[in-house]
């Protein structure tokens, strides 16, 4: 059996950890089969407990943009560890990384560090509510902003009504303050503002959506959100947990040239350690505790090991002026060549791509919102997933996820990947 040790480990894990995993998508529920247990990673490759290696297109769901275990990041963490793991006091390093981020990301004056993307988004909407004195927020179907209560809301009966929770444990009271619209549907956003005058604190959006597969904003969607927020005194929050330092150093704000009021970060900003952050201009950020009244805190926020890993990762990216161009090229090549192979096989598909994010949808010609993702042939993706996995290609274990390309993926890896796609039988 190919995945013998992983199977045994999963069985054991299942007894002691709910569902055998510490984050649901790892469980392979979407694609079926047993999740692979990894034991090490280096550069473009993962090694599982059965000693099989894989070219990694998840990269820890985004953080490993330099590939795994980059030697300079490793050294930075090791050196920091010798000085201490955590002090619970301010450190110079926190100012160093904050300054670095403020100087290199557009439209922000201050940044607050947290330990996950979830915390960053949760804190950003609290701040937006505190700042505006309003309670409602707008989010889009299929966008993910972490697992805090306000965001686990699905469209109930049409978008003009209140959302209903889509996880037990989220209260109706919380759900009623989260309004939903379809991604790329600006008319629905206009209606929400019309029907909830002076009540909407913020719109939160993934500027390139990556949690329903990769979906691009269309028809000036983001520019229109900017405009309607300005007209109504609402805060525009870009959730750049995925896109920050991935699409460009200044994230989607820079790449798409749209200005947000608050920006959230995670993933790449921690270089593989648990980090999140949220940032904005002084006027808003000054409302945060202890300077202002909006409370937010964290025992391990700004943790020195995490800050060191994050800062080193950002510096290594910044050092190479061609970094993002090269990532784009790799991804473009994959897109183009995989597209060619699928066309030759007569498999109808759509590849969405921006920068080093991409995903493939089967049996559809365009995909611009969550409904259209649901209309794609997820079964065919699952089939593909298992066939290429056996050949050493590790795609995200769900047709609803984005692939993340790292700078460690070179031509050898691309060739091997394309070979696996050529062998795809459906
Ligand atoms: C991953 C992700 C989050 C949540 O971050 P965690 O670190 O998993 O809590 C929030 N928003 C977006 C866009 C993400 O991709």
Image: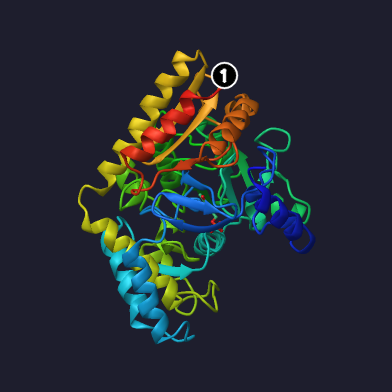
Label 1: which secondary element: loop
Q: Which residue is drawn at 34% across and 72% down?
A: 75
Q: Quadrant location of residue 340? A: top left
| Colour mapping used in the image | rainbow
Residue 170 visible in the snapshot: no
Neighbor class of circle 1 (other Cα within 10 Å; few <14, some 14-19, many 20+) is: some
- Please tell me which residue lies in front, 220 or 85: 85
Residue toward you, 319 or 100: 319
Numbered marks: total = 1
Residue 421 place in picture, x, y as percent: 48, 27
Quick check: 333 above or below 267?
above
**Residue 114 in sight from this viewpoint:** yes
Quarter of the figure that contains the N terminus: top right
Q: Is residue 126 left or right of residue 356?
A: right
- In the image, residue 257 lies at what x, y percent? 30, 43
Residue 194 position (above or below residue 297): above
Q: Name the residue under label 1.
A: 363
At horizontal 34% and vertical 39% (from top left) the residue drawn is 412
Question: Where, quadrant-wise, is the C terminus in this rendering?
Answer: top right
**Picture coordinates of residue 234, whole percent (x, y):** 48, 51
What residue is drawn where x is 51% and y is 26%? 367
Q: Does the residue labelled 1 lie within 8 Å of ligand 1?
A: no
- Does residue 414 sit above or below 9 in this rendering? above
**Is 186 positioned to the left or the right of 37 in the image?**
left
Residue toward you, 68 or 99: 68
Q: Residue 15: horizontal and vertical position, in percent?
A: 79, 60
Q: Quadrant of residue 100?
A: bottom left
Would you say 249 lies left or right of 235 here? left
């Amino acid at each position: 059996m190919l995945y013998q040790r992983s199977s045994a480990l999963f069985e054991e894990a299942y007894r002691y950890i709910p569902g055998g995993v510490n984050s649901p998508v790892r469980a392979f529920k979407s694609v079926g089969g047993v999740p692979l247990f990894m034991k090490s990673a280096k550069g473009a490759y993962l090694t599982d407990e059965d000693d099989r290696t894989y070219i990694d297109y998840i990269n820890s769901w985004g953080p490993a943009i330099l590939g795994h275990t980059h030697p300079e990041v490793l050294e930075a963490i090791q050196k920091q560890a010798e000085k201490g793991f955590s002090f619970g006091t301010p450190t110079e390093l926190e100012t160093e990384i904050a300054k670095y981020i403020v100087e290199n990301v557009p439209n922000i004056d201050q940044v607050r560090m947290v330990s996950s993307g979830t915390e960053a988004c949760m804190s950003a909407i609290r701040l937006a509510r505190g700042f505006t004195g309003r309670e409602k927020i707008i989010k889009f179907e299929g966008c993910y902003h972490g697992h805090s209560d306000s965001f686990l809301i699905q469209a109930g009966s049409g978008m003009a009504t209140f959302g209903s929770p889509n996880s037990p444990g989220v209260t109706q009271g919380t759900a009623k303050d989260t309004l939903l619209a379809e991604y790329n549907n600006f008319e629905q956003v206009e209606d929400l503002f019309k029907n909830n005058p002076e009540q909407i604190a913020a719109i939160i959006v993934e500027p390139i959506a990556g949690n329903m597969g990769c979906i691009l904003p269309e028809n000036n969607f983001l520019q229109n959100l900017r405009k309607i927020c300005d007209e109504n005194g609402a805060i525009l929050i870009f959730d750049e947990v995925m896109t920050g330092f991935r699409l460009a150093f200044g994230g989607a704000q820079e790449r798409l040239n749209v200005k947000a009021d608050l920006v959230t970060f995670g993933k790449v900003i921690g270089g593989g350690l648990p980090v999140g952050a949220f940032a904005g201009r002084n006027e808003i950020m000054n409302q945060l505790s202890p300077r202002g009244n909006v409370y937010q805190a964290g025992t391990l926020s700004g943790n020195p090991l995490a800050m060191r890993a994050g800062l080193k990762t950002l510096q290594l990216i910044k050092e190479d002026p061609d970094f993002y161009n090269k990532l784009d090229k790799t991804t473009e090549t994959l897109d183009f060549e995989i597209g060619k192979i699928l066309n030759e096989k007569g498999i109808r598909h759509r590849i969405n791509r921006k920068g080093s994010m991409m995903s493939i949808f089967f049996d559809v010609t365009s995909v611009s919102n969550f409904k259209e993702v649901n209309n794609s042939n997820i079964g065919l993706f699952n089939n593909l997933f298992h066939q290429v996995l056996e050949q050493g290609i590790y795609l995200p274990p769900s047709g609803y996820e984005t692939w993340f390309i790292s700078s460690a993926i070179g031509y050898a890896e691309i060739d091997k990947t394309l070979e696996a796609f050529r062998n795809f039988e459906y």
